[in-house]
Amino acid sequence: METVLLLIHLIVAVCLIGIVLLQRSEGGGLGMGGGGGAMTGRQAATAMTKLTWVFGIAFLVNSVVLTVIAAQNASGGSVVDLLPPDTAVEAPAVPAGESLLPPSGSDDLLTPPRSE
């Protein structure tokens, strides 16, 4: 059942992308384009916009149904619980402070080069 819904979800997503790309561009982005002759707040609903609404609602409903099915199938455990118990690795010991320094060739203090 979940596989069928995932397949339907994929088909609806591709159709939604296609129908949005096929629509006429109004220019300006985010609905700021000109409305043609009459500057009204509402445009005429064409078949493309109605189809966009249908695919958008189908995508949303399918997403919610898939989420509910995935939550029901979840066992409530963690992926870490699936590991065998002998795979636990202890962290290495922290080295002493002196071993963190790079080895020096001599005990003399290093002096910066002279600029002449």
Image (cartoon, rainbow, N blue to C red):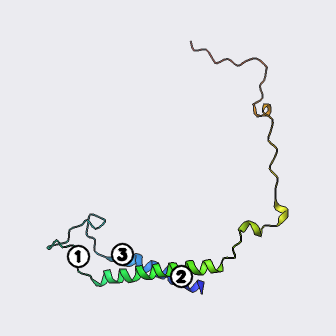
Left or right of 83 in this view: 57: left
Point 23% across, 77% down: residue? 43
Q: Residue at x 70, y 19 (%)?
A: 110
From the viewer's perspective, is residue 55 above or below residue 93?
Answer: below
Q: Amino acid at mark 3?
A: Val
> Is 33 situated above or below 57?
above
In terms of sequence position, does the residue under pointer 3 or pointer 2 come before the other?
Answer: 3
Q: Earlier in the sequence, mark 1 or mark 2?
A: 1
Which is nearer the eye, 79 or 22? 79
Q: Which residue is mark 1?
A: 42
- Which of label 3 and label 1 is nearer to you? 1
Q: On the rendered image, what quadrant is the N terminus found in?
A: bottom right
What residue is at 56 percent from the left and 77 percent from the top?
Answer: 67
Q: Is residue 20 left or right of residue 76?
A: left
Amino acid at the residue labelled 1: Arg
Q: Quadrant of the C terminus?
A: top right
Is residue 22 rendered to the left or right of residue 15?
A: left
Residue beneath disc 2: 65
**Percent position of residue 14, x then y:** 45, 78
- Marks 3/1: CA distance? 19 Å
Please give the residue where the numbered disc 3 appears in the rendered image.
20
Residue furthest out toward the top: 116
Element class at badge 3:
helix
Task: Check disc 2 and give the amino acid type.
Answer: Val
